Image (cartoon, rainbow, N blue to C red):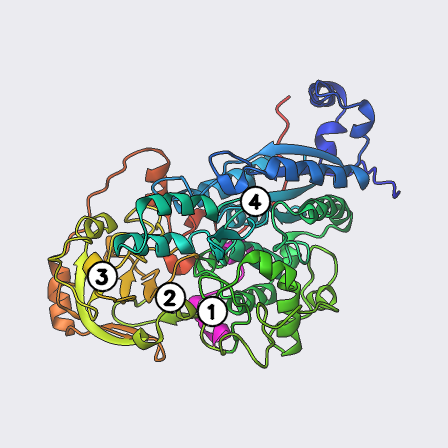
Amino acid sequence: MTDRRNSNRRSQAWFGAQGRSGMLYRSWMRNQGFGHEVFDGRPVIGIATSASELAPCNAHLTRVAEAVKRGVWQAGGLPLQFPTMATGETLMRPTAMLYRNLMAMEVEELIRANPLDGVVLLSGCDKTTPAMLMGAASVDLPAVMVTGGPMLNGKYRGRDVGSGTHVWKFEEDLKTGRMTEEECFFAEGCMARSNGHCMTMGTASTMACVAEALGMQLPGSAAWPAVDSRRMETAQAAGRRIVDMVEEELRPSRILTREAFENAIRVNAAIGGSTNAVIHLTALAGRMGVKLGLDDFDRLVRETPTLVNLMPSGKYLMEDFCYAGGLPAVMAELLGGGLLHGGPVTVTGRTVAENTAGAERVGSDVITPLDAPFQPAGTGIAVLRGNLCPDGAVIKQSAASPHLLTHRGPARVFDSPEAYHAVADDPGLDVDENTVIVIRNAGPKGYPGMPEVSNVPLPAKLLKAGVTDMVRVCDGRMSGTGYGTVVLHVAPEAAVGGPLALVRDGDPVVLDVPGRTLHLDVDDAELARRREGWTPPAERYVSGYTWLYTQHVEQADRGADFGFLRGGRGHEVPRDSH
């Protein structure tokens, strides 16, 4: 075994200190049963775990942390586990996105304040992965991500059901009488039948794949199911690897380059990934000082086909994706077609090209070949511009209805998601299949937190009439497990005076996804008159974290991060107060 003792390590500013200071640090650590020999200069590795029973996707991460510890000990490091908050989309109100930035701040400060030389990040649910990446990026100590893995495939009456995706399907079946309350209650227990995060290509699976595509997660580790023994093997391998990364001084700043972000954007298109990846990648790029804008997403997606046939855009689930070759097989296809940069270094110390060499697809239905893709190039996330979204909006084409991608219809405006839900089942609601449902005040500042409410269910009377989709426009987000022709992330949002605030019932809304436009067909003079009469909503928060959030959150096109968190603050050792 390599002798990893080094008196110049960051952690030795604590454990190698002379006199009273060193004695205090070492003696208090020894109350946990550590012998004096572990303070000999070996790498000290933090294991940041977001395990929480309030975040069901992350509840099993305590066991994953034990596997990481084994790997750190094997490699000659000292593993020290510490908790972080968990931003579970499943339970948190009003939305976990409100707390992503808070979690990122906590992760950053915990890493910086403690005697750590490197860190392993354990995440699972939607916002925990980007929050941890953002925090670690701002400190820039060696870091490797270990996501907790997807659940096993859901099973209901002999067919696969997907977490999240089938929630909407079952709700529609319940409203139209195709399903009883008792059947629905039974079915909900069939969707989540093991530890892990959503097994559809929702945001959790998307961000796990994105972390791997960025080079921050070991190859193949995004897809192993949470309860598969190889999930623990992967975690143990990450524990060994982070010790080597400390030796090599392999930091996020060497991995999270412009080329790495371009790879992640193309991978997200190829896997049919969540629109939320746009928000999170943009925010992460801001932490790294990498210039990344919405137009980059649109440009790169236009050239990239969808290769992965997973819900909500397809029919399979993450367990199938894993057995079909996982992300290395997808990246090998893209690399072979010249659609990925092969040169970026990853947490393995090797390049993307080296990591994917030899990766193969198993079968041809779950991961399709580049020359016969599941969906052709340009059918992923599209970025729209126009007088309704001057700073941009996005739509997931693969989850939309093709006949609605070009559409003109009258607006039916609701000032909140709750206002819509209050009348959605009213048989007298004045809407038809051509109506464009506009939901506003659901953006970063307006809600606050930009919740996943944009894909509101269709009005009950239209569902009963056989309508399966409508155009919806919103300044909020949509779950990656959701589907429908939904325009999202409209920027600027209504609450800060974006044009969405000026729309009135009956105004013609023109959607042209092939032309990349979203237009309100109302003349400029009328819009100017309406703007003169517009007043911003009253401030609802005067103290606490939510006040901080509403005062400092940036718009969706900039990643909804806090402006004061852009860029990095480094890992300089804080002053000793002892």
In whole angstroms, how far apart are the C-alphas of marks 4 and 1?
Answer: 25 Å
**Residue located beneath label 1 in the image:** 297
Q: Earlier in the sequence, mark 2 or mark 4?
A: 4
Q: Which amino acid is tagged 1? A: Phe
Q: Main secondary structure of the magenta part?
A: helix
Which span is picked out in magenta?
283-302
Task: Give the x, y percent position of residue 193.
Answer: 52, 44
Mark sitting on residue 557: none
Mark sitting on residue 464: 3
From this viewpoint, is residue 367 visible?
Answer: yes
In this orientation, which residue lies closer to the viewer: 29 or 291? 29
Q: Residue at x 56, y 66 (%)?
A: 267
Asked whether, in this view, residue 347 is left or right of residue 560, the answer is: right
Task: Give the x, y percent position of residue 283.
Answer: 47, 55
Provide the secondary structure element on which disc 4 rests: strand
In whole angstroms, how far apart are the C-alphas of marks 3 and 1?
Answer: 37 Å
